[in-house]
Image (cartoon, rainbow, N blue to C red):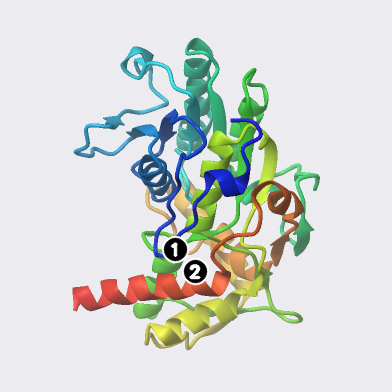
């Protein structure tokens, strides 16, 4: 669909969902991995609403005719799927903690298997959902661009294996796009804000502080990310690696305290310096690793990292390729709080 403009293809609706119309393009057969997850599921829904033939893959069991439960890291049978025009690779092990072998299996081997499938079925276009964590260093980082050098040592195994998956994609002979989103949030998320809110409800969330300027960070609202993924799937002019965020950096603790206030959850009463929290997280991770614990420590270095160091992104390339995000950060927060409040009320 080379040459099709943003306005021709995307019909924005100011409702709670994004809708696409295929008024000037033929529907495509699109394979979405990680379709049982937050991002993959929302992308699959949006593309299906747009009239595309969507095939969903995920590890969990779902009762859908268009869904295939399989493990991409295993020797899965490609003949079950047939050919497709586009592959959106949203499947990954996304966690700050876990066995190294599990990350290598789910983020690297699974990506390698997927590319072998693509090579055997006509080299469809690939949109790979990576992570902005591939850039992270233990320091403030402002205006991170696609040309910012990557660290020699990654912040954790997740970031390391996401970069390894990118290197596999970069060797692909077909068309590809890599998106590096920063802190995806929105209705339906079970990780970012919900985990923070649950910790606050249980009185387990401290107020992490550092001396000097406050920590700021970028986020991206789920509908904006879905919009960008869908565009990358059908617009041939979109290629290469792109940082994606809302482009509206916010003071991290201001965001959290504001959401807690709106949810009528008491703010943290304990104040802990980030350097002390980082020391405790390092010690806990060592204990859990040596002790062979399978569960995640109550605090991880990556978790503290979010409160310890500012991370903002240069989204010039994103704006050139996709245009401005349609949902502002504040509107995204408002929608998310409404959904969380409704869920909280339903639980009584």
**Quadrant (top left/top right/bottom left/bottom right) for the N terminus:** top right
SS type, badge 1: loop
Q: Residue at x 53, y 52 (%)?
A: 225
114 displayed left or right of 132: left
**What x and y, as percent, mark residue 231?**
56, 42
Q: Is residue 95 in view from this perspective?
A: yes
Query: Which is more toward the observer, 268 or 50?
Result: 50
Contact? badges 1 and 2 (CB < 8 Å): yes
**What x and y, as percent, mark residue 199?**
39, 73
Q: Is residue 160 in view from this perspective?
A: no
Quarter of the rendering containing residue 60: top left
Query: Which is more toward the observer, 192 or 243?
Result: 243
Instruction: Give the number of callouts.
Output: 2
SS type, badge 2: helix
Q: Residue at x 22, y 37 (%)?
A: 64
On the image, numbered disc 1 is attached to which residue? Answer: 186
Labels 1 and 2: the sequence-earlier one: 1
Query: Which is more toward the observer, 273 or 79?
Result: 79
254 displayed left or right of 187: right
35 displayed left or right of 176: left
**What x and y, as percent, mark residue 196?**
44, 70
Within 10 angstroms of label 1, few (less than 14), some, or many (20 or more) residues?
many
Q: Which mark is residue 332?
A: 2
**What x and y, as percent, mark residue 268?**
47, 84
Q: Residue at x 24, y 78 (%)?
A: 345
**Quadrant (top left/top right/bottom left/bottom right) for the C terminus:** bottom left
């Amino acid at each position: 669909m080379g040459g099709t403009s943003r306005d021709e293809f995307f019909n924005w609706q100011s409702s709670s969902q994004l809708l696409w119309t295929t008024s000037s393009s033929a529907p495509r057969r699109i394979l979405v991995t990680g379709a049982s997850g937050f991002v993959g599921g929302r992308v699959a829904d949006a593309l299906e609403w747009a009239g595309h033939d969507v095939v969903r893959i995920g590890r969990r069991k779902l009762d859908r005719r268009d869904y295939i439960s399989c493990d991409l890291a295993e020797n899965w049978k490609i003949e079950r799927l047939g050919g497709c025009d586009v592959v959106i690779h949203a499947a990954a092990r996304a966690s700050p903690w876990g066995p190294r072998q599990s990350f290598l299996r789910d983020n690297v081997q699974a990506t390698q298997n997927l590319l072998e499938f693509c090579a055997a079925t006509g080299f469809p276009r690939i949109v790979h959902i990576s992570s902005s964590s591939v850039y992270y260093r233990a320091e403030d980082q402002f205006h991170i661009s696609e040309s910012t050098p990557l660290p020699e040592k990654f912040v954790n195994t997740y970031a390391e294996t996401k970069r390894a998956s990118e290197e596999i994609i970069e060797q692909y002979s077909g068309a590809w796009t890599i998106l590096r989103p920063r802190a995806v949030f929105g209705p339906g998320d079970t990780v970012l804000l919900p985990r923070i809110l649950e910790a606050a409800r249980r009185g387990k969330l401290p107020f992490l502080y550092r001396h000097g300027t406050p920590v700021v960070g970028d986020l991206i609202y789920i509908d904006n990310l879905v919009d960008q993924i869908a565009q990358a799937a059908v617009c041939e002019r979109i290629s290469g690696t792109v940082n994606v965020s809302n482009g509206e950096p916010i003071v991290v603790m201001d965001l959290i305290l504001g959401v807690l206030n709106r949810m009528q959850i008491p703010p943290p009463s304990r104040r802990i310096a980030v350097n002390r929290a980082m020391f405790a997280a390092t010690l806990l991770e060592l204990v859990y690793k040596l002790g062979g614990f399978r569960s995640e420590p109550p605090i991880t270095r990556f978790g503290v990292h979010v409160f310890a160091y500012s991370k903002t992104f240069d989204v010039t390339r994103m704006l050139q390729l996709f245009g401005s995000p349609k949902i502002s950060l504040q509107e995204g927060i408002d929608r998310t709080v409404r959904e969380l409040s409704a869920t909280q009320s339903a639980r009584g």
